[in-house]
């Protein structure tokens, strides 16, 4: 059975709007954010994301897990870019060295070196802000959109019946998958299986994940077959569907959509005119070069 | 002559990737308002027959179908599934696998939405179906949080809202506690009385007989071997294969040699020494939600064969998950072999306490049954020679010796369940814990493996969660009644199960075997299986 996300009706800004309007705003926000690397332009987006978050009525307890997980994930990748210096090479050409660290050991003749440059450090910060803003908005979705309205939301955004319902099922598949994974994990632990003690080479490690991956995958396949049967047995796809739930745009929804579109147009416009590219404060470069 | 709602003429079907027909030459017809019970062992073709009638065969399940299926005089072969589904409603075995909607009203409305009816009509019909099943109060609840019995009713409402004239029910009682099962049966009787033609597949024949099905069909090896009334059924079928009312079994068995007395947990008759598992004031709740267990205090001792009974959602599974350390108590502590489960890993505890999960599909992964069984003992670092021996023995107990080289995932549900039990048996833990071991199993199979497991040397205690009161009557030497996260009663079966008022409060319904045993208790001094009561009667 499909598990629902932890949605709860709340008196909050995000739930004040029609879900279609919010989804449109979200998409505009997403593409607008992706237009920039300049921290000065990215910060307003972070502010918008945080505004939605802090007015969402969610408590830290409720969202602690996804935030810690996704936050750590985003931080990890930003840090990785910082260490390797890769990823940022496309947006800056010259680098200004702050300090160079050399490892006191060699690995097979190679000595790890960490060069801290102004560009690398600032790029990592920009990358973090950029991805984290999007993450905040994305985490809000499962908590704020009523699962009973998924289908009609997508239908209302212009998708055909079948695709809208498929999207509905897909959205609910993610928490279902997580539940199945947990059940399988428990069942295998009860047979003495310990994920923490998996060792060996990469291929061997993947092979040892079989007891988790196989049942979860099979379960997902069987589960989708059940869903298809259950839909077929209740006449899915015979005629244009009537959607039980109805959505009605209010004036505020048009305002939100207009705002989203405006942000997107301005962002794309700025991007095309060459503004919003990676930026490093002059002062920082002067400081690094000792000037 | 009026047209019959359902007619089958010489229907046979073979699944594309399997040898031999799953059903052959099935011929029968049903009248309006007729309630038909279809009984038979696992794999006899009952589910295939249901799929042939509702059109999933040959549309979703490919193969060779021959013969004629007529619904209201119309042959279904050429009809689209959606058209058939408006005449033939199907409730699958597990409502979990059928429910699609997030809210009850969405779920019930699903078929009507697909038919493209006007919104007001949809709401009217959905609410009507809910009201008919007396669950209108669930209208805006989330389906995910419903109890097993409620889910079943919601799934049924979703089908009834489409106003079919034929209703197919595939083991509708399988996941229900006894009281919910009884309510469901009463509902089914009422639907038939109001003119619906109902074909119900069910292992729990004895329970269904209480609502007086108009006809009973018994299937074996893909054929209908008996079709007639309840009285005739008792004479026509093997009482070891279909569970009949206890009195009937006892009478039949009286003419046969008495069954062998089984010795529970051989070599474990003294219950002296330290308790194997000890719950001290255990309370638990999932995250911030309400508490599921409240202050549980109990011990599992050597020689105990414990049946845990109680309604869906009473906290039974949560309770046993504490014993293996998958869940840690919010307050109090659980000791296994004297060690706090907080200080031991699940894998460590697994060496002492083997836990068979409810659903086998969450654990099966290996390419062969043999490897599946060796997985646990290997993790526990048992020596290879011993593993081989234990695997062999476990396979014999669950009667799967000839399938040892097959992939477990290709087996039927009943067989997979037995593999999952064997996988734990092969670990040779001291304590065996089973969550609904007999669900989805046919009578003969589960009686056989329960006999074998409990006679297996090496176990010091066995605990099983069950909805089957007879299992507690036959096998347990201790019964724990759980309700709302508390232990309501704990003691010998003959003491706990005689309190019908308490049973009723815990949604446990006395069975004919329990009635008969209590009646004969002054003579027998203990609870016995129906076959053994024949000589006492």
Image: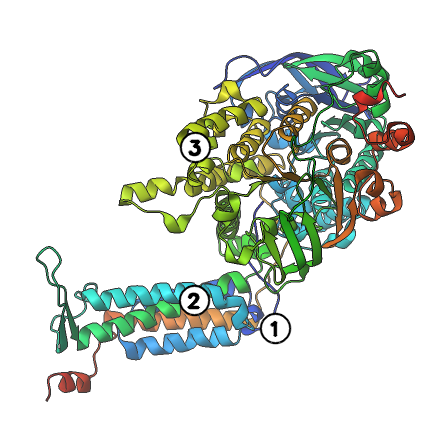
For disc 1, the neighbor class at 10 Å (few under 14, some 14 to 19, many from 20) is few
Q: On what subunit does the disc labeled 3 rest? A: B
B454 sits to left or right of A97: right
| Residue depicted at x 49% and y 24% | B392
Q: Residues within 10 Å of mark 2 (few under 14, many from 20)?
A: few
Image side of residue B466 versus residue B489, left or right:
left
Residue at 74% over, 53% down: B138
Name the residue that disc number 2 marks: A68
What residue do we see at 61% from left, 63% from top?
B330
| Sequence-first disc among 1 and 2 | 1
Residue at mark 3: B366
Percent position of residue B458, x then y? 58, 33
Badge 3: residue crowd in 10 Å (few <14, some 14–19, many ≥20): many
Residue B449, quarter of picture:
top right
Residue A34 higher or lower than A170, as above or below? below
Task: Residue A11: give its label.
Answer: 1
Q: Residue at x 39, y 72 (%)?
A: A262
Image position of B118 with respect to A49: above or below = above
Q: Evaluate whether label 2 is on the same chain as label 3.
A: no
Local SS, label 2: helix
Q: Nearer the viewer, residue B111 or A94?
A: A94
Can residue A150 be spotted in the picture? yes
């Amino acid at each position: 059975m499909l598990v629902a996300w932890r949605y709860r009706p709340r008196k909050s800004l995000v739930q004040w709007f029609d879900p279609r309007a919010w989804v449109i705003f979200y998409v505009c926000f997403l593409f607008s954010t992706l237009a920039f690397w300049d921290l000065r332009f990215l910060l307003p987006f972070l502010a918008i994301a945080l505004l939605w978050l802090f007015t969402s009525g969610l408590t830290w307890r409720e969202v602690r897990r996804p935030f810690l997980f996704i936050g750590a994930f985003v931080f990890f990748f930003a840090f990785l870019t910082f260490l390797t210096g890769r990823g940022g090479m496309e947006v800056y050409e010259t680098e200004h060295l702050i300090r160079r660290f050399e490892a006191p050991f060699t690995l097979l003749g190679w000595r790890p070196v960490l060069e801290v440059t102004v560009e690398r450090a600032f790029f990592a910060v920009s990358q973090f802000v950029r991805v984290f803003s999007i993450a905040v908005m994305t985490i809000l979705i499962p908590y704020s959109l009523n699962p009973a309205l998924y289908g009609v939301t997508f239908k209302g955004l212009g998708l055909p019946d079948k695709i809208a319902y498929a999207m509905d099922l897909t959205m609910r598949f993610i928490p279902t998958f997580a539940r199945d994974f947990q059940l399988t994990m428990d069942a295998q632990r009860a047979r003495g299986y310990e994920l923490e003690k998996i060792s060996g080479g990469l291929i061997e490690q993947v092979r040892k994940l079989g007891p988790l991956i196989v049942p979860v995958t099979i379960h997902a396949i069987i589960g989708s077959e059940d869903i298809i049967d259950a839909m077929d047995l209740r006449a899915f796809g015979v005629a244009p569907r009537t959607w039980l739930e109805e959505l009605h745009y209010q004036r505020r929804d048009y305002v939100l959509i207009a705002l989203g579109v405006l942000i997107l147009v301005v962002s794309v416009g700025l991007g095309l005119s060459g503004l919003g590219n990676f930026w490093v404060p002059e002062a920082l470069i002067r400081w690094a070069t000792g000037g | 002559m009026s047209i019959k709602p359902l007619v089958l003429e010489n229907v046979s079907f073979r699944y594309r990737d399997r040898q031999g027909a799953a059903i052959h030459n099935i011929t029968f017809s049903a009248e309006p308002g007729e309630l038909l019970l279809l009984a038979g062992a696992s794999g006899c073709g009952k589910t295939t027959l249901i799929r042939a009638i509702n059109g999933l065969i040959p549309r979703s399940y490919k193969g060779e179908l021959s013969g004629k299926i007529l619904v209201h005089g119309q042959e279904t072969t050429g009809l689209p599934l959606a058209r058939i589904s408006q005449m033939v409603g199907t409730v699958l075995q597990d409502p979990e696998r059928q429910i699609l909607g997030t809210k009850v009203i969405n779920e019930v409305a699903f078929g009507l939405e697909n038919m493209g009816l006007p919104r007001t009509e949809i709401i009217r019909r959905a609410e009507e179906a809910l009201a008919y099943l007396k669950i209108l109060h669930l209208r805006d609840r989330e389906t995910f949080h419903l109890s097993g019995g409620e889910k079943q009713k919601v799934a049924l409402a979703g089908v009834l809202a489409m106003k079919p004239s034929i209703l197919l029910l595939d083991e509708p009682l399988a996941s229900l506690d006894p009281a919910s099962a009884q309510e469901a049966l009463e509902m089914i009787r009422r639907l038939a009385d109001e003119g619906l033609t109902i074909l119900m597949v069910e292992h729990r024949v004895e329970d269904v007989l209480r609502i007086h099905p108009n006809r009973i069909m018994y299937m074996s090896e893909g054929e209908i071997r008996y079709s007639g009334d309840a009285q005739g059924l008792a004479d026509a079928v093997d009482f070891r294969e279909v569970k009949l009312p206890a009195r009937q079994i006892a009478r039949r068995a009286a003419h046969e040699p008495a069954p062998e007395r089984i010795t529970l947990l051989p070599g474990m008759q003294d219950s002296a020494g330290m308790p194997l598992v000890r719950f001290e004031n255990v309370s638990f709740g999932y995250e911030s939600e309400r508490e599921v267990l409240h202050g549980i205090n109990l011990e599992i001792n050597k020689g105990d064969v414990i049946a845990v009974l109680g309604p869906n959602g009473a906290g039974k599974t949560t309770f046993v998950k504490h014993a293996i350390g998958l869940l840690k108590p919010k307050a109090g502590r659980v000791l296994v072999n004297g060690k706090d489960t907080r200080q031991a890993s699940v894998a460590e505890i697994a060496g002492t306490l083997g836990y068979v999960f409810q659903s086998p599909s969450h654990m099966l992964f290996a390419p062969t049954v043999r490897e599946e069984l060796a997985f646990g003992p290997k993790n526990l670092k048992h020596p290879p020679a011993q593993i081989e021996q234990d695997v062999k023995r476990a396979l014999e107990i669950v009667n799967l010796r000839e399938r040892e080289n097959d992939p477990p995932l290709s087996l039927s549900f009943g067989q997979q369940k037995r593999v999952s039990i064997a996988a734990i048996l092969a670990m040779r833990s001291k304590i065996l814990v089973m969550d609904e071991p007999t669900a989805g199993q046919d009578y003969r199979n589960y009686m056989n493996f329960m006999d074998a497991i409990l006679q297996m040397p090496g176990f010091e205690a066995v605990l099983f969660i069950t909805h089957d009161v007879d299992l507690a009557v036959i096998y347990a030497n201790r019964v724990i009644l759980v309700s709302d996260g508390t232990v309501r009663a704990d003691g010998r079966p003959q003491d706990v199960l005689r309190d019908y008022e308490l049973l009723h409060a815990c949604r446990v319904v006395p069975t004919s075997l329990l009635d008969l045993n209590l009646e004969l208790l002054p003579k027998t001094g203990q609870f016995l299986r129906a076959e053994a009561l024949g000589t006492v009667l």
